[in-house]
Amino acid sequence: MFELPQRATDIAAQVEAFFCQRVLPNNKVWEQQAHAGQAIPEIQRTLSAEAKGLGLWNMALPRLGDDEPGMRLTNLEFTAVAEILGRLEWGSHVFNCNAPDVPNMELLQLFANDEQKKQWLQPLLEGDIGSAFAMTEPYAASSDPTNLETRIERDGDEFVINGRKWFASNASHANCELIVLVGVTDPDGPKSKRQSLVLVPRNTPGINVVRNLPVFDHLSETNRHPEIEFNNVRVPVTNLLGEEGAGFAIGQARLGPARLHHCMRAIGECEVLISLMVKRSPARSTFGKRIDEYSSTQAAISLSRIELDQCRLLVQQAAHLLDTIGNKAARKQISMIKVAVAKMYQDIADRCIQLYGARGVTGDTPAARAFGKARAFRIYDGPDEVHLQTIARLEASEQSLDGLEHYLTE
Ligand SMILES: Cc1cc2nc3c(=O)[nH]c(=O)nc-3n(C[C@H](O)[C@H](O)[C@H](O)COP(=O)(O)OP(=O)(O)OC[C@H]3O[C@@H](n4cnc5c(N)ncnc54)[C@H](O)[C@@H]3O)c2cc1C
């Protein structure tokens, strides 16, 4: 294990206590309020105010300025906390540590000017508004962002946006006031210089939510994934984020910490699934034997523990590298955790469903939802194959092949 500074251990203990005493016991209340149509359930608002009062706020943003609210934990320090938040679907939201707001805040920290920070970063840091990131398009293979087609055309002092996006997570939520949109400003430029990022207020005329997309029939309460049309949407040219033509590079910068945080949360969720397997298997018997006495059950639990601990170490390593050498230099390790954690997450959710029998495929346990989320995780933030391609390319470029001929005796 990577040794965490005392400060991080203390904060993790404080978050653990708050989670166990205040958040987890209110899970059923949260579910009832969310299903009753409360966009941000009342209980979540109450707990967020309490967490903020305790200073347990914006824990995933190491670059916070002195006058900005939050904890300034390093990525490695945050690993211990993120696991706890990941145990519940809405856990991160209580502490303003949720996607897509955190990666969008990181982008604004890195590339926004003072005016843009005042307008968008400050209310996001306070938890007063939500945001979305709209890159993926239904008609473009978006694993390769250079394929995007949505146009951003200049008309005097304004940009005019036309196109269709989907899976713009959170864009249809009542709290969403900002869409960070990736589109093409220079269709004839070099492929990696064609795109720019523009800050689009959610209430701008011409933005039309076509539908919310379920993930395996499940419409998330915390994070809807809408398909959206942009019809002659006009924003001032001052809404450009960073340089014109730098959209591809800026979008890539966003994905390092975003992937890391998803992995950290998944590990926390998998810990819950393993505990649920351990709880259930001695409680039922078949053919004169308790289910935990079957070697297949023991293998399901043991393999889950092995894979989870392997992934935790890989994630800690990637977090340490993000802190010390930065996103770009750590991109191989980010791709490695993205592939390894998504697979582990899917496999553990699958085993948990199996051990719960028919109940496992219902909504009575978190396993079915976890399985759907894990399967989707193998696609969003880059499909498995794209990360495997990155790892293989970097592996080839890093390898020294000197002396290998001595191993080849024939
Ligand atoms: C739950 C969820 C949330 C999401 N949230 C957001 C969001 O907030 N904002 C946003 O912009 N997008 C979001 N996405 C979209 C996601 O990032 C894209 O779906 C992803 O980048 C893949 O793009 P695509 O769907 O166009 O697949 P395509 O690019 O069409 O690829 C389809 C398949 O082709 C194969 N493939 C692609 N490239 C290669 C390769 N190099 N080698 C081998 N095979 C390959 C893979 O099997 C891949 O799955 C979300 C998606 C999901 C499911």
Image: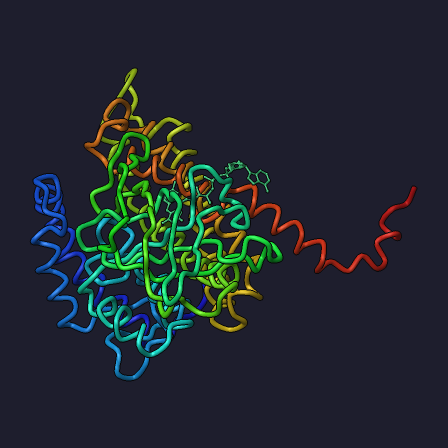
Q: Quadrant of residue 385?
A: top right
What kind of colouring is applied to the model shown? rainbow
Extreme-right residue of the structure:
410
Q: Where in the figure is residue 324, as x and y percent of width and height? A: 51, 73
Which residue is found at the position 29% from the left and 33% from the top? 368
Q: Quadrant of residue 136?
A: top left
Which residue is found at the position 24% from the left and 63% from the top? 96
Which residue is found at the position 54% from the left and 46% from the top? 147
Rendered-image quadrant of the C terminus: top right
Residue 303 in view, yes or no = yes
Extreme-front residue of the structure:
156
Tell me if 135 is positioned left or right of 145 in this view. left
Q: Where in the figure is residue 376, as x and y percent of width and height? A: 39, 39
Rendered-image quadrant of the N terminus: bottom left
Q: Where in the figure is residue 76, as x and y percent of width and height? A: 41, 67
Residue in the foreground of this view, choosing between 132 and 5: 132
Residue 344 in view, yes or no = no
Counting the numbered discs, the total is 0
Residue in the foreground of this view, choosing between 368 and 210: 210
Above-or-below relation of 179 to 383: below
Q: Where in the figure is residue 112, as x and y percent of width and height? A: 38, 72
Extreme-top residue of the structure:
287
Residue in the foreground of this view, choosing between 224 and 379: 224
Tell me if 60 is positioned left or right of 127 in this view. right
Which residue is found at the position 26% from the left and 75% from the top? 118
Extreme-bottom residue of the structure:
66
Above-or-below relation of 334 to 106: above
